[in-house]
Image (tube, grey):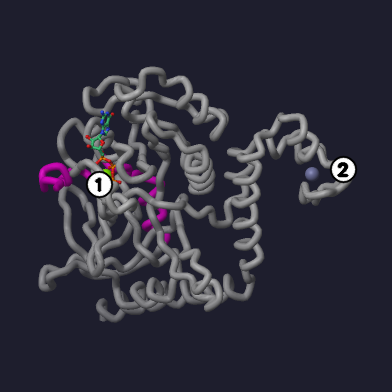
Amino acid sequence: MTSPATDAVPLTAVGWDERLQARFASLDLTDPHGLQPGRIARVDRGAMTVLIDRASIRAELSPPLRRLAAGGEPEAIPAAGDWVAVRTRPDHALHEIVAILPRDGAFVRRAPTAHDRAEGSEPAQVLAANVTIAFLVAAATDVRAGRLERAGVVAWEAGAQPVVVLTKADLVADPSPAIATAEAAVPGVPIHLVDSVTGEGIAALAPYLVGTPTIVLLGASGVGKSTLANALLGGDVLATGAVREADGRGRHTTTARHLVPLPGGGALIDTPGIRAIATWGASEGIDRVFEEIEAFAAECRFSDCAHASEPGCAVRAALESGEIDPARFERFQRVERERVYEAQKQDPALAAERRGKWKQINKAMRKRGDEKHV
Ligand SMILES: Nc1nc2c(ncn2[C@@H]2O[C@H](COP(=O)(O)OP(=O)(O)OP(=O)(O)O)[C@@H](O)[C@H]2O)c(=O)[nH]1
Ligand SMILES: [Mg+2]
Ligand SMILES: [Zn+2]
């Protein structure tokens, strides 16, 4: 739905700067035809849409990157928001992405199915990369604490500042219960109430648009992410739609993650509603979102207290006195179990092997460049 004109912006308008230029240079990729920096706007099955300076092009992964991505290496799996080195190939239908720059952070999801776990193979999915602000979008008519908690955890882990945006303000007589639920779910996170259709409340989001932020919109299908995106973009850039709940599953209007330049600088990444966000390896994020539980846990007699039946458990005491909400504690435990499971799986040998592979690729890239010089 994006017009070419929207995408034809200077790369600096979507956040390219000297820091990234230095990162690009340190890849030490040589090529007589020249490589240029770009930012992935969209990932489709075989090809990516990449914003380069003042243009938008289509590109595919180089064969070594493709092999790594197929092997499930998150660093090689391209995502909206990734900074890349592109080799332009006028003689090909698609240009070529030869490197993905190291990320500041990413929303990574590994397939959490029992089968994948048993197999030990977990095809990772990188949802978005290099995000600075995450709008946790929920409809004021139906705020789910569990969703906000998980979204908050992954936002912190991805290095993004979470901000709650409650849409459909026009459909609730009294927004205070919605706000109270959000406040309790992600303590300390700013909360905004908007009606994206009339634009009411949108102006209050202006401070987040200063500079060149990369903002991702997270939230269930139908909460109004794309409608909010259009309000921020100042036009009908993204498709929106009524959700059909007839089959109980709804229908996603947005089907792919998609980065679009913001008119005043920066970029917005719209996403399809993600059903259950898994929180992989998220420990700092858990501490921040469940701060009151962590505060009580610090008072437990044993530092490794599991808050089950240990003596001197401050969390149990707080649950009994009503200072901790039992439903929230249950969700905390679930997220915490996922984290522990992931942490145990972090195999140092695997990590070393992965680093080795990357060295090989970089070497292969340099050699390739040198050969062409001869
Ligand atoms: N009344 C009202 N309706 C809204 C508001 N925001 C969105 N809607 C409506 O909600 C429906 C879904 O909006 P979308 O923006 O497509 O929702 P989405 O989150 O992008 O959904 P997916 O792409 O499926 O993930 C549309 O009919 C919108 O017009 C709002 O603030 N107020
Ligand atoms: Mg959408
Ligand atoms: Zn305890």
Tell me if residue 46 comes above or below residue 186 in the rendering.
below
Q: Is residue 206 something one can see in this rendering? A: no
Toward the viewer: 221 or 46? 221
Residue 116 locus on image (x, y percent): 49, 73
Q: Quadrant of ligand 3?
A: top right
Tell me if mark 2 has few (under 14), some (14-19) or many (20+) residues whose alpha carbon lies within 10 angstroms of its own.
Answer: few
Amino acid type indicated by mark 2: Arg
The residue at 31%/77% (across/down) is 63
Membership of 188 in magenta stretch: no
Residue 87 locus on image (x, y percent): 23, 66
Q: Is residue 332 something one can see in this rendering? A: yes
The residue at 36%/18% (across/down) is 173
Tell me if residue 32 comes above or below residue 136 in the rendering.
below
The answer to whether the residue bearing label 2 lies less than 8 angstroms from the nearest atom of ligand 3 is yes
**Residue annotated with mark 1:** 244
Q: How far apart are the two marked residues, 1 and 2, measured between alpha carbons?
A: 51 Å
| Quadrant position of residue 269 | top left
Residue 346 locus on image (x, y percent): 62, 66
Residue 166 locus on image (x, y percent): 38, 29
| Helix, strand or loop status at disc 1 | loop
| Helix, strand or loop status at disc 2 | loop
* Residue bounds of the magenta highlight: 1-26
The residue at 38%/52% (across/down) is 128
Toward the viewer: 333 or 266? 333
Q: Which mark is residue 301?
A: 2
Amino acid type indicated by mark 1: Arg
